[in-house]
Image: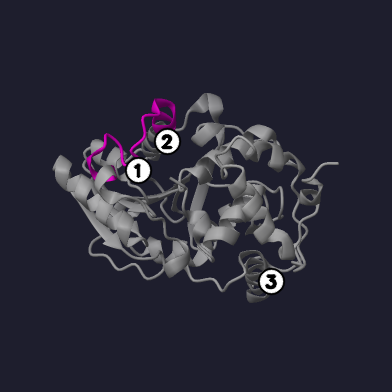
Amino acid sequence: MNDDAWLGAVGPDRLDAFVARVDAGGGPGGPAFDALCRIFRYVPVQQVDQDLDPLSEAYGAQMIALYHEIAGRDLDQSTGEMTDFEIERHVVEANPYALRDANFISRHARTVLTTVMVANLPGAPRILDLGCGWGLSTEMLGFTGAEVTAVDINPRFVELVSRRAARRGAKVEVVQSNFDDLALDGLYDFALFYECLHHAVKPWETIAHVARFMKPDGRIAIAGEPIDEYWWRSWGLRLDPLSLYCIRKFGWFESGWSADFIARVFTENGWTLTLIPGIGLDDGPIGVAQRADIAVGRPLALPAARFFEPPQQTAAPAPVAQARRRSLLRRLF
């Protein structure tokens, strides 16, 4: 008899047991996790009416109710988006993760720099690195010679990024803030959301707020974000095993969106989003947005051979699911 058979239909009353089972097997990075993922299925109690307007308060309220069910707590991103770590070691290591994994670091560095290349920025740009986390994206952006302002909600990350920048003599300002209360001086040429916009509860309001800090010809980019229609037609909490583990154990808000929905998020704010498939993290998309009322501006540096409409997907293929896992594990060191 398979002792893990109960994982094939897990309700909210068994999520703590699921977290304990994952931890007993070495955590999400442990050797047993892949086997658990193959049989795990979450059965929510809270229903979400996908015929509602996904920008409506009614739809949002149902998704927050689903978060309460999964997390077992109220949503509080001032405490629920924290990551603790030994800061002194991370300050002095070669990279902010204190890793010796060249493949891991190069995958993320390449994605950040590809996003900058596609955005086709002016010389000596001012760049806003939103949700900078450990600061790898900040360090890559600074390497280009840009003037960088890095933003994160976690004071430990703010200290880490600040201290590493000071050691390098880099021109980096670091601000502790969430997305929606951010206050800045001056305007920016480029704003990057790297693996972080999906933590915004109302990304349409986040984009509206960030747009206030952009120059008239400025650009906003997203990369490393979960874009698919596997669980929801528009947007919602991701229900894969790793996302559920992180929501339940840490209280993180782990959402995802369809390509049409995230394009609408920008359109509603007067911006046009261009999604380029296949060139981002683990062959995912990169998106770059510019104001829709800019008649003539700098063209995006689009890789013509890869610029095509992706086929519609009814399910997340294994490589995509694995990419999501690797990206989430980035926060778990």
Identify the image quadrant of residue 180.
bottom left
Nearer to us in this view, 73 or 161: 73
Judge whether residue 96 is colored magenta. yes
Pointer 2: residues within 10 angstroms few (<14), some, or many (20+)?
many
- What's the residue type where badge 3 is placed? Gln
Identify the image quadrant of residue 297.
top left
Q: Are marks 1 and 2 in contact (CB under 8 Å)?
A: yes
- What's the residue type where badge 2 is placed? His
Magenta residues span 90-107
* Residue assigned mark 1: 137
Q: Is residue 143 left or right of residue 203?
A: left
Judge whether residue 89 is colored magenta. no
Residue 156 horizontal/vertical position (percent):
31, 57
Identify the image quadrant of residue 26.
top right
* Residue assigned mark 3: 62
Residue 21, visible in the rendered structure: yes
Q: Are marks 1 and 3 in contact (CB under 8 Å)?
A: no
* Residue drawn at the location 44% of the way across and 56% of the way down: 293
Residue 314 horizontal/vertical position (percent):
76, 42
Residue 42 horizontal/vertical position (percent):
74, 55
Residue 108: which disc?
A: 2
Disc 3 from disc 2: Cα separation: 34 Å
Earlier-in-chain disc, 1 versus 3: 3
* Residue drawn at the location 68% of the way across and 34% of the way down: 318
Residue 309, visible in the rendered structure: no
* Residue drawn at the location 38% of the way across and 55% of the way down: 84
Disc 1 from disc 2: Cα separation: 8 Å
**Location of residue 159 with respect to 138 vertically, above or below:** below
Residue 210 horizontal/vertical position (percent):
39, 62
**Location of residue 301 with respect to 331 vertically, above or below:** above
Earlier-in-chain disc, 3 versus 2: 3
